[in-house]
Image (cartoon, grey):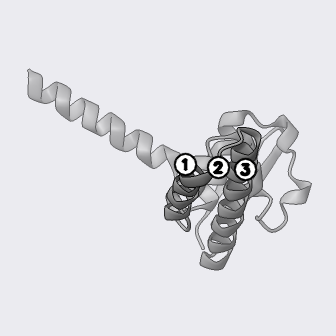
Amino acid sequence: MKKKSFKIGEKNLMVARLDVQQVMDLTEQLDSFDRDQLIADLDESKVTGEERLKALREQSGQKGLVSNLIRSAFTMKGAMRIISSIDGMESWPLSEASPDEISEIALHSLGFDMSEFEESAEKKETSNEDGKK
């Protein structure tokens, strides 16, 4: 299991990736949360009939997509939900972490390393600039 070190405050945190079952559980929790939120929104808006059924079907079509979980890592609430699944995180000084650091930790635990994406984007920019010359 690939771990990455994050320095938060004075503490170095070794963050491992979540296992497949943990990611599946998080995806299921997010699906349930999103459905409950949609139903509450539909109730509050007094949406009924065909329009309500259409909205519920569309949401159901998104069920189980890990991409929704990944997107949620870019929100504080979603990132904290993901981080809370990491064993031992209770002792981490997350109050000292920036929102960017919290998202980066959450994304790493899902198997995404933002530094790899940034390096890839920089290489692509450089190659595009070289091609223009």
Q: Mark 1 and mark 2 in contact (Cβ < 8 Å)?
A: yes
Q: Which residue is mark 1?
A: 51
| Residue 114 pos. (x, y %) | 51, 46
Q: What's under tag 3, amino acid-wise?
A: Gln
| Residue at 71% across, 53% down | 39
Q: Nearer the viewer, residue 37 or 7?
A: 37
Q: Nearer the viewer, residue 2 or 36?
A: 36
| Residue at 53% across, 63% down | 66
Q: Which residue is mark 3?
A: 37
| Disc 3 to disc 2, C-alpha distance | 16 Å
Other residues around mark 1 within 10 Å, as few (<14) / some (14–19) / many (≥20): few
Q: Nearer the viewer, residue 57 or 110?
A: 57
Q: Which residue is mark 2?
A: 48
Q: Mark 2 and mark 3 in contact (Cβ < 8 Å)?
A: no
Q: Nearer the viewer, residue 115 or 25?
A: 25
| Disc 3 to disc 1, C-alpha distance | 16 Å
| Residue at 59% across, 57% down | 69
Q: What's under tag 2, amino acid-wise?
A: Thr
Q: Is residue 36 left or right of residue 55?
A: right
Q: Is residue 56 left or right of residue 118?
A: right
Q: Relative to 114, does residue 81 appear above or below in the rendering?
A: below
